[in-house]
Image (spheres, rainbow, N blue to C red):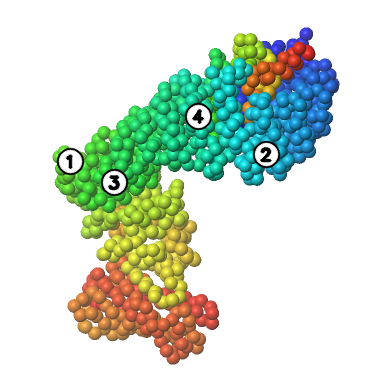
């Protein structure tokens, strides 16, 4: 006999499947079986239909598709006999779900079965309905179910009750119909009906507000009485579990009371006694008792305030916490998290136990305990708590370390009482688990370090020591390299020793050693190596004796395959070799990074924050289209000698870059135009012969690639000024500019210093003429005062007249507001504006200026540009 | 709501009974079962019986060679579910007499019937063993 004919009994098929040794064999068996079943279905085989369906269910459970059997279910349901119906409904519930359209076909059968005389069949139908009915079916059959809620047999009533739950969930509008029936269910004696009735009422309250009101008014008292009865009931053999009669009913009732009492003081008052009784009298040596206590505590926490009960509840939780059973402890920790909002003090008392739980073997308990500890931290207990957590960090598992590290870092940041403690803790965390520390965290650390100027020496020495022990932690290496670069001389000369430190001698070459190790290690990533390069540059200045060695190290990376490293290496080595004179100004100490703006920005932008500290802005390669302009201000407005606070308009920084200060007090475009022209001016200056870039209205655009190619390379250098600290203008940028400008000025001998200077016609075109008058302030030969006069040589009136100028780096320009911005036609009037130019290379280089004038004629925007080369030589 | 699914899995990870009270496609089910089973089987005896997975919890207990896993919502009482699992096992034990994994495998539909009497749509209906087993015994007598 073919073992796979539809005559196979279910158990034989199961045996066959179990005998398979491989997955492929199993698939083969299943396939044969499905084929046999499909054949039987198409033959409309009556006898073995239920057997086939049972097999199909097994196959479905194994995970194979069985949709061809769905119609079989329907046929079975429509059959007359009970076993067939049984299997049919079971198949229906397992193989189908509410989204299938086939379900609609069942509606009629269901309706007939709901009215059947055999109550078991009615029960079947209710069961099926309760499990998978869809919204339309619910609407159709709701009246039947309502009727059945009052059936004589309690089994049917209880099933009808649960069915109603599904109906009201699917079709909330029908909720009112069930209100009365549900209320009457609550008066039953049969526990099954009671449980389901209570469940129905709870869900009714959740679904509709008026049901909640109704039950609150009518049923709270009777519920309390019911609970009292159940608690005090005598031994019921059928429902007894571990000495408690029907704990499930207990729990359901408690939950219902919770829903009723939440937010309502009167209802809560009624419950107080019974809750106290349950809390105190229930035995807690068995799981069932603990389950009831747990539910009771939850209820107490949710209803209106009653301090006596609350204290009771938290005591119970405290007892749970010290129970040896892991389940109980887990549950207690869960509850305590909710309890903190209610009564934080009480939970603090259990802090030590909770801390122990963080170190537990069990992963679930550890997670919960850690979250709880995080909520418990406040200013007073932060130091011992963090100490414990860091000690645990050393021994914890890898998968837990990530979470633990993140939590420790955020606790330390929020609550640190003093900077030195913050730095200490962070160093410990970095040494232990630096690889799990996120980038923002160590950026914040650097911000703090740079602000704590008296701790610089201490920090760099601690980092040096830490590096010796834990140099595989990437973040630690990055922070250490940055600090050594910045504060290297403090490390070597033991500056700023605190009396808690041990003395340590570090030579210059030791410091360079460290950076060399970091840069040469295979596992260092791009950021680390880039940071090492710049640290080396700084050190080459601070430790002149090691300069040669540093040069050798840098040169090794000239051929690196990574563009960033190659570029830096080449630039830095050229600085070290050729530009000794500016090197020291380039690598002066970083300015203090503003903590407030950093934390504000960080709070505003998560998760991938715009980099603000210099270390972070290393990641500002050309691909970054939108760096926040503010950080660049920090770096770049060091071009002026004083350290200005970061100004709010992002556009100004480019003008600072050029030493151009376009203080346009004019009402018109304000700063939005100024940066626009600023960027274009910048481009004009540097785009050697290529047309000016189009339309960059935001300063950010200047830093995005996609400009024409010749400007890109020079722009690259601008966008990585962060790689060079301090002065912000890249030396490479200075180089081409000087080259550019060397071309401008022909090297003429410096003329004699006549103190009067002739006025010049700076610019003349068909429509416009600009005159410059010069005067010098006595005592300051470098500064020149220029009076510019604009006159209109065309017959049209010019409106919105704006004059802008850009000067090379060795000049500083200051524009005062213009006298007006309307230029009358044909020279009938003029606009005057005064400029102040300071020439740092007075005597060596003459003034040069590029200008641009923007105005509107007849409503049309016009732009004129030009260069002024004819300044008197000795200005 | 309440209970989302009930699974019985043996120590090799093969599903012996699966009852879902929410809709999941076949692939989702297999993936879910694989993930959860791996997590639970890897835990030791000392660890607690509750596992957090995605946005719900799994309460599990091992009886001989079979793991009973119940997936519940986050606000459900875990200890009560543990009791429920025990009740389920006792009910099956009363019906089959010393129930073992093979009993469940070969009488899968009976196990389903029992479960249906106890849980509907994710809520516990009946906890009285006699009431649960009555219709099943009737049906056995009839056939």
Residue A47 located left or right of residue A700: right
**Mark 1: which secondary structure?**
loop
**Mark 4: which secondary structure?**
helix
Mark 4 and mark 2 on one chain: yes
Q: Which numbered tag is attached to residue A241?
A: none
Query: Are the residues flagged by discs 2 and 1 in contact, CB closer than 8 Å?
Result: no
Q: Mark 3 points at which residue?
A: A417
**Mark 2: which secondary structure?**
helix
Please rate how many residues cluster around mark 2, counting C-alpha atoms within 10 Å: few if below 14, some from 14 to 19, many from 20: some
Q: Name the residue under label 4.
A: A277
Q: Mark 1 points at which residue?
A: A500
Q: Which residue is depicted at the point 68% across and 28% down? A: A188
Q: Nearer the viewer, mark 3 or mark 4?
A: 4
Quadrant hosting residue B29: top right
Mark 3 and mark 4 on one chain: yes
Residue with the most extreme bottom position: A828
Q: Where is residue A528 in the image (x, y as percent from the top left)?
A: 34, 43
Q: Give the vertical position of A478 relative to A122 (above or below).
A: below
Q: Which of marks 3 and 2 is in front?
A: 2
Mark 1 and mark 3 on one chain: yes
Please rate how many residues cluster around mark 1, counting C-alpha atoms within 10 Å: few if below 14, some from 14 to 19, many from 20: few
**Mark 3: which secondary structure?**
loop
Q: Which numbered tag is attached to residue A169?
A: 2
In this view of the protein, which residue sits in the foreground, A610 or A310? A310
């Amino acid at each position: 006999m073919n073992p796979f004919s539809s005559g196979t009994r279910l158990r034989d098929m199961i045996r066959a499947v179990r005998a398979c040794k491989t997955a492929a064999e199993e698939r083969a068996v299943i396939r044969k079986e499905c084929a046999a079943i499909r054949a039987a279905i198409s033959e409309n085989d009556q006898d073995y239909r239920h057997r086939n369906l049972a097999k199909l269910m097994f196959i479905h459970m194994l995970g194979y598709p069985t949709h061809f059997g769905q119609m079989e279910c329907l046929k079975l349901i429509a059959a007359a006999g009970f076993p067939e119906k049984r299997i049919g409904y079971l198949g229906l519930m397992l193989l189908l779900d509410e989204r299938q359209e086939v379900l609609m076909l069942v509606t009629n059968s269901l309706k007939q079965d709901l009215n059947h005389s055999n109550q078991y069949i009615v029960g079947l139908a209710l069961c099926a309905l309760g499990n998978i009915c869809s919204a339309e079916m619910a609407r159709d059959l709701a009246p039947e179910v309502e009727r059945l809620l009052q059936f004589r047999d309690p089994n049917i009533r209880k099933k009808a009750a649960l069915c109603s739950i599904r109906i009201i969930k699917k079709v909330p509008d029908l909720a009112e119909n069930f209100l009365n029936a549900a209320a009457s269910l609550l008066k039953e004696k049969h526990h099954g009906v009671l449980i389901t009735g209570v469940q129905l009422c709870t869900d009714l309250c959740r679904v509709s507000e008026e049901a909640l009101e109704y039950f609150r008014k009518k049923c709270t008292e009777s519920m309390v009485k019911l609970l009292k009865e159940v608690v005090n009931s005598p031994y019921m053999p059928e429902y007894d579990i571990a000495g408690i009669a029907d704990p499930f009913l207990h729990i359901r009732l408690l939950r219902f009371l919770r829903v009723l009492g939440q937010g309502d003081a009167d209802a809560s008052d009624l419950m107080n006694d019974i809750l106290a009784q349950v809390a105190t009298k229930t035995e807690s040596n068995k799981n069932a008792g603990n389950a009831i206590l747990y539910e009771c505590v939850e209820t107490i926490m949710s209803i209106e305030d009653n301090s006596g009960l609350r204290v009771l509840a938290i005591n119970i939780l405290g007892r749970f916490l010290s129970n040896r059973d892991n389940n109980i402890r887990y549950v207690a920790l869960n509850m305590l998290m909710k309890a903190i909002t209610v009564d934080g003090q009480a939970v603090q008392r259990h802090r030590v136990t909770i801390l122990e739980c963080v170190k537990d073997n069990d992963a679930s308990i550890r997670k919960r305990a850690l979250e709880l500890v995080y909520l418990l931290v406040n200013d007073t207990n932060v130091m011992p708590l963090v100490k414990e957590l860091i000690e645990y960090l050393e021994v914890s598992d890898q998968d837990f370390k990530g979470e633990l590290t993140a939590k420790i870092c955020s606790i330390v940041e929020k609550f640190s009482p003093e900077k030195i403690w913050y730095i200490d803790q962070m160093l410990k965390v970095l040494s232990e688990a630096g690889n799990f520390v996120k980038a923002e965290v160590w950026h914040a650390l650097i911000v703090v370090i740079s602000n704590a100027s008296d701790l610089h020496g201490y920090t760099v020495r601690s980092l040096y020591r830490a590096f010796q022990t834990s140099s595989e932690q990437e973040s630690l290496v990055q922070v250490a390299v940055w600090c050594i670069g910045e504060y290297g001389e403090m490390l070597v000369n033991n500056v700023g020793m605190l009396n808690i430190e041990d003395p340590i001698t570090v030579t210059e070459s030791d410091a360079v050693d460290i950076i060399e190790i970091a840069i040469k290690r295979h596992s260092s990533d791009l950021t680390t190596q880039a940071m090492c390069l710049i640290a080396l540059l700084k050190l080459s200045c601070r430790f002149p004796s090691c300069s040669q060695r540093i040069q050798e190290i840098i040169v090794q990376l000239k051929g690196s395959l990574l563009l960033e490293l190659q570029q830096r290496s080449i630039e830095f080595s050229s600085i070290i070799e050729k530009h000794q004179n500016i090197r020291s100004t380039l690598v002066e100490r970083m300015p203090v990074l503003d903590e407030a703006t950093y934390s504000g920005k960080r709070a505003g932008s998560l998760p991938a924050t715009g980099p603000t500290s210099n270390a972070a802005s290393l990641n500002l390669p050309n691909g970054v289209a939108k760096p926040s302009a503010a950080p660049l201000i920090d770096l770049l407005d060091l071009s002026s000698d004083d350290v200005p606070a970061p100004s709010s308009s992002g556009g100004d920084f480019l003008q600072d870059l050029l030493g151009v200060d376009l203080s346009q007090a004019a009402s018109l475009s304000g700063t939005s135009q100024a940066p626009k022209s600023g960027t274009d001016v910048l481009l004009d200056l540097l785009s050697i012969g290529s047309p000016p870039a189009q339309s960059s209205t935001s300063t950010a655009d200047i830093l995005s690639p996609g400009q024409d190619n010749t400007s890109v390379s020079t722009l690259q250098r601008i966008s990585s000024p962060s790689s060079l600290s301090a002065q912000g203008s890249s030396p490479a940028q200075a180089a081409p500019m000087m080259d550019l400008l060397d071309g401008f000025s022909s090297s003429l001998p410096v003329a004699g210093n006549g103190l009067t200077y002739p006025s010049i016609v700076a610019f003349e075109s068909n429509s416009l003429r600009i005159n410059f008058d010069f005067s010098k302030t006595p005592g300051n030969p470098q500064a020149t005062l220029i009076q510019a006069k604009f006159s209109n040589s065309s017959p049209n009136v010019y409106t919105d007249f704006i004059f802008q100028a850009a000067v090379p780096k060795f000049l500083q320009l200051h524009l005062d507001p213009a006298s007006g911005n309307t230029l009358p036609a044909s020279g009938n009037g003029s606009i005057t504006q005064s400029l102040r130019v300071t020439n740092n290379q007075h005597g060596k280089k003459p003034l040069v200026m590029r200008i641009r004038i923007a105005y509107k004629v007849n409503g049309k925007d016009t732009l004129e540009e030009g260069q002024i080369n004819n300044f008197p030589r000795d200005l | 709501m309440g209970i989302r699914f009930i699974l019985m899995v043996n120590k090799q990870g093969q599903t012996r009974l699966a009852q879902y009270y929410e809709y999941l496609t076949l692939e989702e089910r297999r993936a879910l079962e694989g993930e959860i089973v791996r997590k639970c089987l890897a835990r030791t005896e000392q660890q607690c019986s509750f596992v957090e997975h995605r946005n719900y919890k799994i309460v599990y207990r091992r009886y001989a060679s079979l793991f009973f896993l119940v997936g519940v919502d986050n606000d459900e009482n875990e200890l009560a579910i543990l009791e429920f699992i025990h009740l389920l096992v006792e009910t099956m034990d009363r019906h089959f007499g010393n129930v073992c994994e093979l009993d469940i495998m070969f009488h899968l539909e009976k196990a389903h019937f029992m479960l249906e009497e106890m849980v509907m749509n994710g809520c516990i209906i009946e906890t009285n063993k006699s009431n649960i087993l009555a219709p099943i015994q009737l049906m056995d007598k009839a056939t």
